[in-house]
Image (cartoon, rainbow, N blue to C red):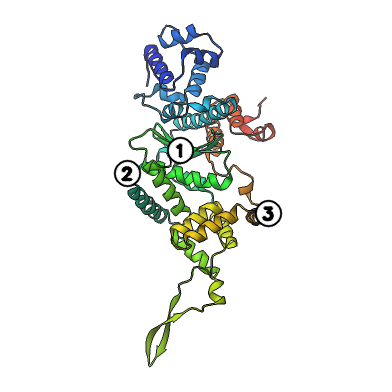
Amino acid sequence: MTITQEELARRLKEAREKARFTQEQVASALGLVRPVIAQIEAGKRKVSSLELAALARLYGRPIHSFFEEAFEAEGISYILRAVPEVRSEHQIQEGMNRGLEIINAILDLENKLGVNRLSSGPLCAYDRKMRTRWDAVEQGQEIATQERNRLGLGVAPVGDPASLLDAQGVLTLEMQLPPGLSGFTFRSGQATICVINSTEPLVRQRYSVIHEYCHALCDLNDLPAIVSREEGKKDLREVRADVFAACFLMPENAIREFLQRRGKAMPSRIQVPLMVKDKVESYAARRGSGKQSGQSRIDYLDVADMARYFGVSVEASIWRLNDLNLINGKEKDSLLTEDRSPTGKAIKDILRKKDSDKDSEKGGIFQNATEHLFYRAVEAARGGLISRNKLIELLELAGLQNEDIYAISEARRTT
């Protein structure tokens, strides 16, 4: 769509105001003076392509959104208003800017390539009203079960959750976020993006990805974005997402199957089928007591191994077992105390060492954004849609080093 200079100026002003920037702040970020920004927004001065790219990056928008027929509200504008503290620390702001630049680069490349894959996910597939905390709990449990069934996961633990979201068209990205902010989910056009806090422990990041996936499934119908904060745990949307994450990562039937393989959480009575006079009769038999029943008690090693199996924290495993009435309140408190003790730390360290050769210890497995940026940039270069210099710039943004960049034929200088 072709828009006038005046309309572009209006959109630039609207984007700045929604992102809560002053003209002075924008001028400082671009190395200009405030009157220049005022002239651009008044339509009295043309904005160069480099300036437009810088403004789009600052406002958290893909460049092409300024030229679309409908200039819609972007979820990232909501995020920038809802999380003003991201601007209080330079390192966090730099990480946020880089993350938004990655997202916008992907969306611009997909626009050039005519690809709409990122909008194909199940956006608001479960749009349901909640009135009480119990509604939120019930919905979290029910939606987790339905979604696992829809994805055909059975009782298998979730591997890399970003791969799972990727198959649903949801883009995931790690960013350094302020303490107490585990992540946020927003829309950009029709694309859905989940961002998680890269400073949190890996098991917490896994949980956060699935927590944000619930927001993508349930909460973006009436909101352009949603922020997950520690102090927001009483919000019904947060309650539902927490329950969803616990049930999705640790479904009840999978937990029972895991424990029963260890001889734990077994029923006190079992039905034994016997052939009697050409008929099958079922006899109830009680399991052994005393020393044998003591062996079926769920102990800390069981819980730590279960946490490792499902890829969650030990604390999350303990609370899940308590929710399922597989341990009582006293046992829960005892296990939580042991988790914080030197013994608990030693057991977790041993299990971590066993997994030390796995890529989950290397970090960076809970995002798919940089991979998409790499593939889309190379694809666009091969199609002649971007220049060699632009390809190199995008590959650097994706985190590639020089030797890797110039191993790609499209990035090498031709004579």
The answer to which quarter of the image holds residue 406 is: top right
Residue drawn where x is 38% and y is 40% of the image: 235
Identify residue type, mark 1: Glu
Pick whichever of labels 1 and 2 is earlier in the sequence.
2
Query: For the residue labelled by badge 2, is the local secondary structure a helix, a strand or a loop?
Result: loop
Pick whichever of labels 3 and 2 is earlier in the sequence.
2
Q: Is residue 241 left or right of residue 102?
A: left
Position in image of residue 311 (x %, y %): 55, 53
User: How many residues crowd mark 3 within 10 Å: few (<14), some (14–19), many (20+)?
Assistant: few
The Cα–Cα distance between marks 1 and 2, rounded to whole angstroms, is 24 Å
Pick whichever of labels 1 and 3 is earlier in the sequence.
1
Identify residue type, mark 3: Lys
125 w.r.t. 341: above or below = above
Q: Is residue 385 at least partly visible in the picture?
A: no
Q: Is residue 32 left or right of residue 408?
A: left
On the rendered image, what quadrant is the C terminus found in?
top right
347 w.r.t. 188: above or below = below
Residue tagged 2: 127
Residue tagged 1: 231
Query: For the residue labelled by badge 1, is the local secondary structure a helix, a strand or a loop?
Result: helix
User: How many residues crowd mark 1 within 10 Å: few (<14), some (14–19), many (20+)?
Assistant: few
Q: Nearer the viewer, residue 340 or 247?
A: 340
Residue furthest to the right in view is 403
Query: For the residue labelled by badge 3, is the local secondary structure a helix, a strand or a loop?
Result: helix
